[in-house]
Image (cartoon, coloured by chain):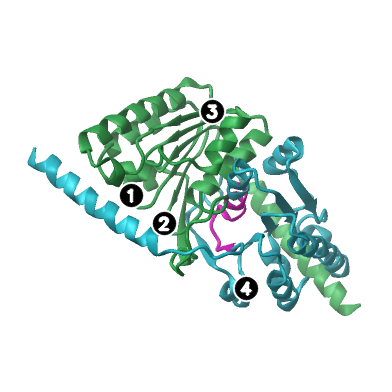
Chain colours: A green, B cyan
């Protein structure tokens, strides 16, 4: 009885604190900017989890894939079939597969033009710029170009930028930055990337 | 011309190394166990991103939600409507909303019975145990019970366990552990949780 009462009291305190915390919060009145970075797994998959969330609320979603375009992934198959996401793939594969810097820059620029258009149109609740941090790291896109377009986005639009080595200037501007840290990875233990889990 | 040639050479080296790495890898011949933990955003959303991946490859997926059952989330709405995921919610909300430990234990046990059944049946490629780490942390479930069921799972089945404060014994057993670190969070800046982004 005492343990149960204690538990109840403790949980009531947690509940009260939680409610107070939530009550203080305000609506930003604009979409958020989120960065998923770090060496760990889950940067892109968590962005696609947020896509599902947004779709569950009947929101409108666009995805621009930088770098990974050539790969056939489960998420791409899923959304192509579902047909409820505007999907644009840079279509040139990983940079080490193309081996032509000028072509990579042209492809990244074209993909970003598409992204800018989505962000400014006011037609989207959520735009995912998948692996854009890699395009920034290889200097296929300039940080200034990306920051300017983020600032000029529609108030309606939240944006998620994924990829390791996110630029500090973009993290400074973002509302939420998550660093996916790799504690342990099956690939490092000698296992192949698994369909459905890794791609 | 030299810069372009240098770039090509560099990317060829990266490509060769990457191919060598991939060639060494073997197929585990069984489903993987993944843990998403840490204080940062993206533990559950990245699990739902993996669900999308699996569905894109026409795999069979089950989700058991511990703790968050009462909440209406975008992902739950999405998958309920899509109807392609077996979904079981503990249905008791956050622990600080129920304030009754015996009822929480009973609900968590019932949810885990469902999870065990899914993992052992051989019917699923992927089972997500969402927020189970919280149920373990509050001792609504024992680590031994969960470990035993993971070990007894079908070879076909990969399992993702989410929630902060993952138990070390479960991380030891897992193939992949990702720690989502919170560098910056909009909620901490005073913004309300946003529909479509946070739930």
- The answer to whether residue B195 is visible is no
The numbered dot on residue A104 is: none
Callout 1: chain: A
**Mark 3 or 2: the one toward you:** 2
- Report x, y in % for residue B97: 80, 57
Question: Measuring 60% from the left and 44% from the top, which residue is drawn there?
Answer: B57
Q: Is residue B129 left or right of residue B23?
A: right
Picture layout, residue B133 above or below residue A106? below
Magenta residues, as a range? B33-48
Q: CA distance from mark 2 to mark 4?
A: 23 Å
Question: Measuring 32% from the left and 33% from the top, which residue is drawn there?
Answer: A108
Q: Are marks 2 and 4 on the same chain?
A: no
Closer to the chain start, of discs 1 and 2, is: 2
- The residue carrying mark 2 is A38
Q: What is the secondary structure assignment of the residue under circle 1?
A: helix
- The residue carrying mark 1 is A168
Q: Are marks 4 and 3 in contact (CB under 8 Å)?
A: no
- The residue carrying mark 4 is B170
- The residue carrying mark 3 is A156
């Amino acid at each position: 009885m005492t343990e149960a009462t204690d538990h109840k009291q403790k949980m009531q305190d947690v509940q009260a604190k939680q409610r107070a915390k939530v009550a203080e919060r305000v609506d930003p009145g604009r979409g958020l900017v989120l960065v998923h970075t770090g060496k760990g797994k889950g940067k892109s998959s968590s962005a696609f989890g947020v896509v599902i969330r947004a779709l569950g609320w009947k929101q409108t979603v666009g995805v621009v894939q930088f770098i990974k375009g050539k790969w056939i992934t489960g998420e791409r198959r899923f959304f192509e079939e579902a047909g409820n996401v505007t999907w644009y793939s840079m279509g040139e594969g990983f940079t080490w597969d193309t081996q032509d810097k000028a072509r990579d820059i042209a492809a990244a620029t074209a993909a970003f033009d598409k992204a800018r258009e989505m962000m400014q149109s006011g037609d989207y609740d959520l735009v995912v710029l998948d692996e854009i941090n890699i395009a920034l790291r290889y200097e296929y896109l300039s940080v200034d170009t990306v920051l300017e377009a983020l600032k000029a986005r529609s108030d309606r639009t939240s944006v998620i930028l994924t990829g390791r080595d996110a630029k500090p200037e973009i993290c400074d501007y973002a509302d939420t930055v998550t660093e996916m840290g790799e504690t342990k990875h099956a690939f490092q233990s000698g296992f192949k990337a698994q369909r459905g889990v890794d791609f």
